[in-house]
Amino acid sequence: MKLRLVIPGSIDQATGGYRYAKRILEAWGDGPAPVVDGDPATCLSRRRGGETLLIDGLALPALYDRLPLPDCAALIHHPLGLENGRDEALLAAEAAALAKIGRIVTTSAATRRDLLAMGVDGTKIRVVEPGTRGAPAPIARRGTPEILCVATLTARKDHPTLLRALARLRALRWRAVFVGPLDRDPAQTRKIRAAIATLRLGRRARLAGERDAAGLARAYARAHVFALPSRHEGYGMAFAEALAHRLPVAGVAAGAVPSVVPRPAGILVRAGDDRALAGALRRLLGPARRRYAANAARLRFPDWATQARRLRAALT
């Protein structure tokens, strides 16, 4: 198969969707290497004969007026209309575009259900979840308990709720590290910095910025607990990677998260409920952490080579 993946900008961007694309293409296997096209507006002029066109959901709006296209598929992480709350106009436009595409790949069963609710034909949807390549670390970590949050600093990830929860745990011993690019939403980054200052968490909550793969692996290995109160996830790669590193999880029961984080391995609460999130963290920072971590260690996630084969099958 000759594959051209259309995705806005560089594939090296540090978000779950871009990491999914990069890692699954790295594991593509035999045959012609897939082509990554970072300019949706002009990608059709570079398309070669025999190429299957796989359009990432972020790139799809630039091609709405060019659909339908021959030998074309869409890769949907989550509907664009669910990025910040629910935008009916965006959902309708995306559903109309997907009606003109013959094959659709989603990264979770939850996103497939979202598309079905939008009226998309389920017979053309295939689910190919992300892989993981976490190197499990020992469960018995020492030192000051470290709470790790891995996410871009955007409104959907809801860092302020996590910060308010941490402020409720001042009497406990912990430090928090927030890994993720700081420049994707500068206004939200300023809001988070202001919250850290207002809640007087400056010495205990650190914005570490973006990390490369090795740096991210080290962050998972040092952590004791993973926390992310995201209000919606199409899959939640960071949650799966945390569990692969034997970290118990505190999060929100939203989107695909409940299917990634089973109850024995984490505690999920309502969106925006900092009191409940603080309670979850209190448990995971205490003696119960070992039990949740042990349950996380028993989970098995597919590797990227397996998922690359599944993507190839979904596109043929």
Image (spheres, helix red, strand yellow):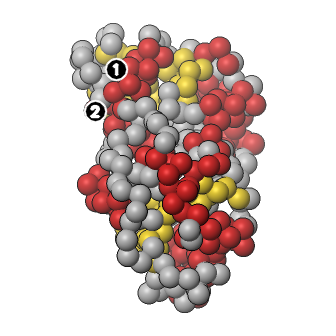
Please give left or right for residue 273 compared with residue 299 in the image.
right
Q: Report which quarter residue 155 is drawn in.
A: bottom right
| Within-10-Å neighbours for mark 1: few <14, some 14–19, many 20+ | many
Residue displayed at 57% across by 42% down: 260
Screen quadrant of the C terminus: top left
Residue labelled with disc 2:
26
Q: CA distance from mark 1 to mark 2?
A: 13 Å
Between label 1 and label 2, give the one nearer the viewer.
2
Q: Position of residue 233 (x, y in %)?
A: 59, 47
Please give left or right for residue 105 compared with residue 51 in the image.
right
What secondary structure is found at the residue carrying circle 2?
Answer: helix
Residue 304's disc number: none
Q: Position of residue 286 (x, y in %)?
A: 57, 71
**Is residue 52 among what the camera can see?**
yes
Please give left or right for residue 199 compared with residue 310 in the image.
right
* Residue type highlighted by circle 1: Leu
Instruction: Work out whether 286 lies above or below 312.
Output: below
What secondary structure is found at the residue carrying circle 1?
Answer: strand
Residue displayed at 69% across by 34% down: 114
**Is residue 53 among what the camera can see?**
no
Residue nearest the viewer, comparing 40 with 194: 194
Instruction: Work out whether 218 lies above or below 144.
Output: above
Residue displayed at 65% across by 65% down: 280
Residue labelled with disc 1:
3
Instruction: Work out whether 150 lies above or below 132.
Output: below
Residue displayed at 54% across by 63% down: 289
Mark 1 in CB contact with mark 2 (< 8 angstroms):
no
* Residue type highlighted by circle 2: Glu
Sooner in the amino-acid sequence: mark 1 or mark 2: 1
Residue nearest the viewer, comparing 171 with 132: 171
